[in-house]
Image (cartoon, grey):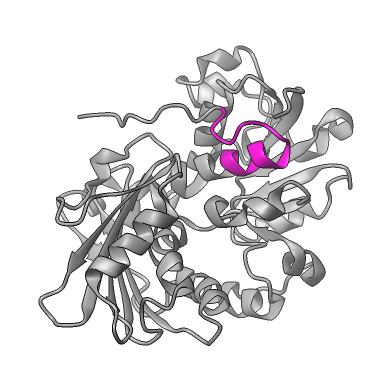
Amino acid sequence: MGSKQINACVLGASGYTGAEMLRLLASHPFINVTAATANALAGRKLTDVYPHLSSYGDMELTTVEDVDWSDVQVAVSCLPHGTSQDVVEGLPDHVRVVDLSADYRFRDASVYSEVYARSHLTPERTASAVYGLTEFARPYLADATTVACPGCYPTATLLCLLPLSETGMIETRGLIIDAKSGVSGAGRSLKEGNLFCEAAEGLHPYGVGTHRHAPEIEQELTARFGEAVRVTFTPHLVPMTRGELVTIYADLAEGQTVENAHATLSARYADEAFVNVRPLGNLPPDTRHVRGTNRCEISVHADRVQGRVIVIGVIDNLTKGSAGQALQNINLMFGFEEGEGLSILQPLFP
């Protein structure tokens, strides 16, 4: 593996994913953050906005226009959907892009337009971007110029389902995904539903039947199953800061068993540093088991309904569901050890 130093710019550094990206990059021995943008806060010290990032010293936030791109090898875009492509398309050609928004996740630009209600600036770029679910994208990352990091819900869901879909272990119809996420998943902008009094001491679904991560999940499952897949996906907002849990209900294919499903997932992730499948019959995972780490914990259970399997996955939405997975991808793009900068495997507890 290589050890050459590279320079990175974090776009949209004032949001939660931007702050998490900077937190992880601060301990990376081979990546220097030479610029962090936040147009509305340009000129302010990064530590004034995020005091916990004290290792960045006197670094000031800047505008995209004022970044010196001449010696930047990678731009990590933590900008909102829509805004990201507006900025990315203006970057110099030599800069490789890892995008944490949805702007390059859809290979078909018309689907992106339908889901996000705006046309795509470069359909050819989104068509060729690598969908950066790292455990399934490794062969394509070394040569990638644009990597689209999956959404947090798709990350947890697809890590649970892709090995089962690839092997024909489950049916394509009737997939139900019950998902729950902490409030940080909604971003840092001021929204009434994110206020403490609105989110605390309650639990509520949102985007019922319409959430934008459902088509993203369907795109990847369709590619793996080889036939069109539709899912029932319902997310819920949980009054906690970090964490995401998905409970997935699937019908087993004819002749398959829960034991087969568990064995398939266990074999697929046996050598993975960041995905762990718990023994069959073990207690299901808790979001506290992955808090602050780049890990995904998965458990498999028999439903009381014959022929149905329940798969549960948990991640930290800001790490494995966002900045941590992005750093996995960057490491593989530039020839570093995949886990560089992601060595914290033990969760924060309590």
Indicate whether 232 appears above or below 190: below
Image position of 301 with respect to 188: above or below: below
Q: Is residue 316 left or right of residue 125?
A: left
The residue under the point 33% across, 43% down is: 242
Q: Quadrant of the C terminus?
A: top left
Q: Residue 149: where, in percent of width, then height?
A: 59, 53
**Looking at the picture, how far across and down is residue 174, in whole percent?**
32, 85
Q: Is residue 61 left or right of residue 312?
A: right
Is 317 included in the stretch rendered in magenta? no
Name the residue nearer the viewer: 243 or 90: 243
Look at 29% across and 62% down and name the residue there: 262
Span highlighted in magenta in the image: 327-340
Q: Where is residue 171, by image quadrant?
A: bottom left
Left-right relation of 25 to 302? right
Residue 83, percent from left and from top: 67, 56
Count the labels in the image: 0
**Nearest the eye: 45 or 239:** 239
The residue under the point 20% across, 56% down is: 280
Residue 20 located left or right of residue 109:
left
> In the picture, which quadrant includes the N terminus?
top right
